Amino acid sequence: MIDSRMIDWRMVFVSGKGGVGKSAITASLALSEARRGGRVLVIGMVESIGAASHLSAQPLGYEPRRVRPGIDALAVNRSDALDEYLRLQLPVPKAAPTRVLTRALSVLAETAPGVREIVTIGKPVYEMWRSNYDLVLVDAPPLGQLFSYLRAPSTIAELVPAGPIRAQAERMSAALGDPEAAALIIVTTPDELPVRETQELLGQIEAEPVIRLAGVVANRVLPDLSLTDTEIDTLPSGPHQDAARHHHEVYTRQQRWLNELPDGPRLPYLFGIHTAGEVGEKLADVWEEVSW
Amino acid sequence: MTRVLVVTGAGGVGKTTLSAALAVGAARNGLRTCVITVDPARRLANALGIDSLTNHPAPVTAQPGLSAAMLDVTAAWEAMVHRHADPDVADRLLTNPFFRALADRFPAAQAYAAGEQMAEHIESHRWDLLVVDTPPAGGGLDFYRAPGQVREVVGGRLLKWLTGAGLPGRRALFRITARPALRIADTVLGGPLLEEIAEFLMDLRSLYDGLSARARSIERHLQRAESIVVTTAEPTPLREARRFFDELQDVTGRPSTVVFNKQLPEDWSVSRNLRSPGLAPEVRSAARDNLARWASEVHLQRDIKREFAARYRLHLVDVPWAADPPTSVDALARLLNLSPELAEYAH
């Protein structure tokens, strides 16, 4: 059974530098939760492929669609999100001219800091409020952009002195910052740039705790070869020795970067498996064994 | 005449490292070379001696003939605003929080700044070869699309949304239909925002003529540039590389070469016995299991490349997987020599 430290919240954001496997891990967490009987909503926040490609062959729409037993999924697109934000989330007076407001809000979203982000991050929060999924699992924007999304409510509070946008931003901020309700998983690989970006975000969250950290997951970690340098030297030269040396070098470098990360689950490098569907399933199997 | 080599690809595929390797190779071949990097890993930056973020190329001490710059998006945009706007408008824009937000988040802003730097270095006529490492956004697509997108934004797309029709002049904006609508919106949304934004967009629009001409010349440079797409056989970079070729069919400078980085040796895939009498049994089995694991990766890489080459009729160039990233100009040169076909680009 998956360690409950990772997903025991109503809403879990999964982020990481591009290419580290965050979408695959989001998918595997959804599968794990579904296997233990939970009802999951997976939300692709910035791309319609992402986690969905590990769960379903069809691209996702804005309405939740069943992709696996126990798992629904949707993708946020900005214009629908903007529309929904205006219709359902902002308490605007009935008499207000909708067309003018929609246009105005579109321009705001493109120009004013925080507005586009709050409209997008508002979707998962809104689904958590109104639906009764056990877990809302968010395939979040990549690490470099994540903080501007998480921080959007405060950015707006600094920009707008009062009124419905600000009130909504404050409710959103409270929901994201509620340590009983929401948490963030950071995915990384044991390489220089992903680890540095992870450390940078950890620093930002420590300085401004906009969300609780569920954990840092290291992905694509090589197993220990259990051969020493000397033993590798005794191998006859050729592919066996080359592959052993290569493995040992990559493994050693990975361990160095792992030491720079906080303690957390390590997921193995999946040799020879790359198709999206397989990766999600295989990692879901791995979650049952992983411990730290 | 400066030859330009544009290196695109998703984040994390080794694009910056390969750009640097190409630049080192070219300098060693006697070309006056400049490389513009984007966000290099610390040790690579150290290898090139570019610790400080600056758009001005600095000579790389360890490699005669080579200069390197590191893209500074904010400084590039500031320079563009000063070049294209009246002094007082420029000051207003640069201190305006909306402008900073736009430049920070608009994905095309970083890509456009890189294109702008490229144009500037080409037009300086100081270089035989300019190697341009591109921002990873959109898997490289953004770099090609940015000039058009920036032209659109600066040209008043947002302003038209606000006014709902044609573009009014500054005074007309506040006389005709727009002002009451903005007032209503501001009242409902809760701040004196939209009027400020409208003012800001009018200022922004004054950049249009200059910026638009510049964007066109960037597009012309891009059409003449040689281009290399870098990817690995991993799913995310591959998806971006596919998108690149699916969506970028109309660009004249469409690259014909795709570099597959981190490739494993073909001969690892051939199963063979491990004959060596004196070997301890556990060493033997560990080595055998390990080669079998990596062999499955080699098979996978081969299948992926075969499918990719067939689908897009492209020439694929392999670069071997270097366990340790290069940390000196010599190591960069060695990396390039591992792939003779890639090294061709450095002549």
Image (spheres, grey):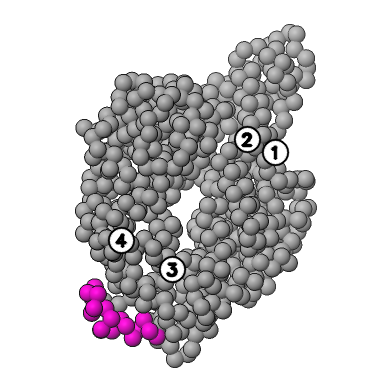
Q: Mark 4 against mark 1, which lies toward the viewer?
A: 4
Q: Amino acid at mark 1?
A: Asn
Location of residue A19 in the rendering, given as x and y in whole percent from the top left corner: 54, 45
Residue picked out by circle 2:
A271
> Could you confirm whether marks 2 and 1 are on the same chain?
yes
Q: Earlier in the sequence, mark 2 or mark 1?
A: 1
Closest to the observer: B215 or A277?
A: B215
Residue picked out by circle 4:
B90
Residue at 47% x, 21% y is: B330
Q: Check contact, mark 2 vs mark 1: CB within 8 A.
A: no
Closest to the observer: A53 or A194?
A: A194
> Could you confirm whether marks 3 and 2 are on the same chain?
yes
How packed mark 4 is, by other alpha carbons closer than 10 Å (few <14, some 14-19, many 20 or more), is many
Circle 2 chain: A
Q: Secondary structure at mark 1?
A: loop
Q: Which residues are magenta?
A: B166-184
Q: Main secondary structure of the magenta part?
A: helix
Residue at 65% x, 22% y is: A244
Q: Mark 2 against mark 1, which lies toward the viewer?
A: 1
How packed mark 1 is, by other alpha carbons closer than 10 Å (few <14, some 14-19, many 20 or more), is few
Residue A157's mark? none
